[in-house]
Image (cartoon, helix red, strand yellow):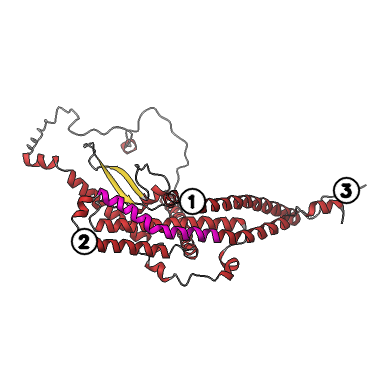
Amino acid sequence: MTAETHSTSGYAPKEQLRRLQKRCRRLAPLLYREQALYLQLLRNLLLPSVRNALGHLLCERGQRLSRMSSEQQAELQQTFDGLIQRCSSLMTVEQLMDLARRLQKEASEFRQQAQREVSQSLQADAESEPQEINRGGIELSLSPPIEHPDLLEGLLPRMDAAVVEDPSIEPVEEPPQPVQDPIDSESSADGTTADFDLLRSLFLMAGEAMQQGDSTSEPVSFESDASRLGASVVPANQLEEELLPSMPVELLNWLDGQDAALSRRIRNLSHALNVELLRAGLVSSLLPTTLLDAAIAGQLQALPSPSNLLRLKLPLPIPSQDQSLDILSVLVRSADLEYDNGSLRHSRYRLRQHRSNLLTMVQQQRHWQSRLTSLEVQSQWWPNPPTTAQD
């Protein structure tokens, strides 16, 4: 073996990919244990943190809370605790992996459905075109096509028949406007309550519709996931073989799936708590899950509020009144939980360090895979160098 071969053998793409695979297998158990520790801390903090958030919300709804009896308040507290405990039992690595797979499948089906709808619309447009295409030249003229007035539709402003001054048409007297009743004027002045009720019903219907739409991917009641809790647990000795991937790109996707599944889980908990608050009459509006997702993604401009609460200011349906509706709802977020607890924040910091190392490995994997693909193409398409004709 020559010196050139010794110097380049360490940079073979296959060898480098094997080394990355070994590093990834050593990193995977550490990442798994750190993720499990983070979820354990989160489960321990979930119940007191949500109770604290509900306490802040109920302090602002003291008048409505005073209307409830002590038995109703105790029953509502048990309902809240039951929802939080069921959600906590589902916040494990295995359960989040199961939910991440379902979310990925849901996103794939949504993309396929969108592609089918686009292809069907294009096919429908192609079939609706006339069979015979006029292949004549383009006619240019300064005079409008009077003989085809339908071509001018939409280009000229519409004029009503009453506005056109025609001497042959007698003017039509407009009917007198009805005089507004004083009772009607008072009811319109106090229409803010009706607007609040209307907005409340709209949000309630939207929330129920979104809850039905999300039932296929992640039910809010958590009961279907609780039934699969024991079936998804895998022994620890099968960790590297069955749970975690052995390449950096797949391991990074696994970590992103954990974060997405955790965000969906606590978002569904927030929606379930808001539904119970609405049923108890402690809040007058229900935000749909789409707005909760937008708030988690930072796409909404929220007002200052305590941790794990969301305060929004929405305009009323009537634009003439310069009023807005202040909505306060529960929105549990991992960022708020980390901000309030130092141990959970340090655990997230260690996960970010592992993620940073994993991103470096991902770049190396893509580089060496590109090099390997280039070598394979060269070996398959041009196995021998071109030879020149000799005299």
| Residue at image point 18% right, 27% down | 165
Give the labeled residue for mark 2.
70
The label shown at residue 389 is 3
The label shown at residue 226 is none
Mark 1 or 3, nearer chain start:
1
The amino acid marked with disc number 1 is Arg
Residue 215 appears in the figure: no
| Residue at image point 45% right, 43% down | 134
The amino acid marked with disc number 2 is Ser
Please identify the quadrant where the N terminus is shown: bottom right
| Residue at image point 36% right, 61% down | 84
The residues colored magenta run 33-60
Secondary structure beneath label 3: loop
Does residue 92 lie above or below 364 as drawn?
below
Q: Is residue 251 left or right of residue 59?
A: right
Secondary structure beneath label 2: helix
| Residue at image point 22% right, 62% down | 72
**What percent of the width, then of the height, locates residue 162?**
17, 32
Membership of 40 in magenta stretch: yes
